[in-house]
Image: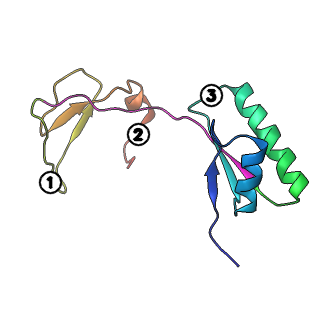
Amino acid sequence: MRKTKIVCTLGPASRTPEMIEQLIQNGLNVARLNFSHGTHEYHAETISMFREVRDRLGVPAAILLDTKGPEIRIGDFKNDSEQLTDGQKFTLTTKEIAGTIDKVSITYKDLPAQLTAGNA
């Protein structure tokens, strides 16, 4: 018995009933929907199509909703790049600064409010 699962992302090129059937027949165990793209209506249509094909084939296959989390980006550095060393203290700041070997700015302004001492 296979212990791993085959996860396939359903998107514009793979969300037709014919393609979904091919994916299932070729081993799909989980259909992944990327909620970073598309509307809820678009994904509801995809889920409906997937369920119709899955049920018609009588195959147990799950649906995975990959929801978008907060995007955290770092700002630019003064130099092109910096090389950090293991164990070095490095600060993330919400202040808009040019990054250095010691600290860099981040785009997620609510991060400090979401952290507590001891978070890793």
Q: Residues within 10 Å of mark 3 (few under 14, many from 20)?
A: few
Q: Which residue is mark 3?
A: 38
Q: Nearer the viewer, mark 3 or mark 2?
A: 3
Which amino acid type is marked by label 2?
Answer: Thr
Look at 66% across and 25% down and name the residue there: 39
Most distant residue in the left direction: 79
In percent of width and height, residue 101 lies at: 12, 40
In percent of width and height, residue 75 lies at: 25, 28
Q: Which residue is mark 2?
A: 116
In percent of width and height, residue 89 lies at: 18, 46
Total numbered circles: 3
In percent of width and height, residue 83 lies at: 13, 48
Front one among 71 and 26: 26
CA distance separating discs 3 and 2: 34 Å
Q: Mark 1 falls on what kind of element? A: loop
In what quadrant of the picture does the N terminus appear?
bottom right
Q: Which residue is mark 1?
A: 85
Span of residues in magenta: 62-77
| Magenta span includes 71 | yes
CA distance separating discs 3 and 1: 40 Å
Which amino acid type is marked by label 1?
Answer: Thr
Which amino acid type is marked by label 3?
Answer: Gly
| Above or below for 2 versus 78 | below
Q: Magenta region's main secondary structure? A: loop
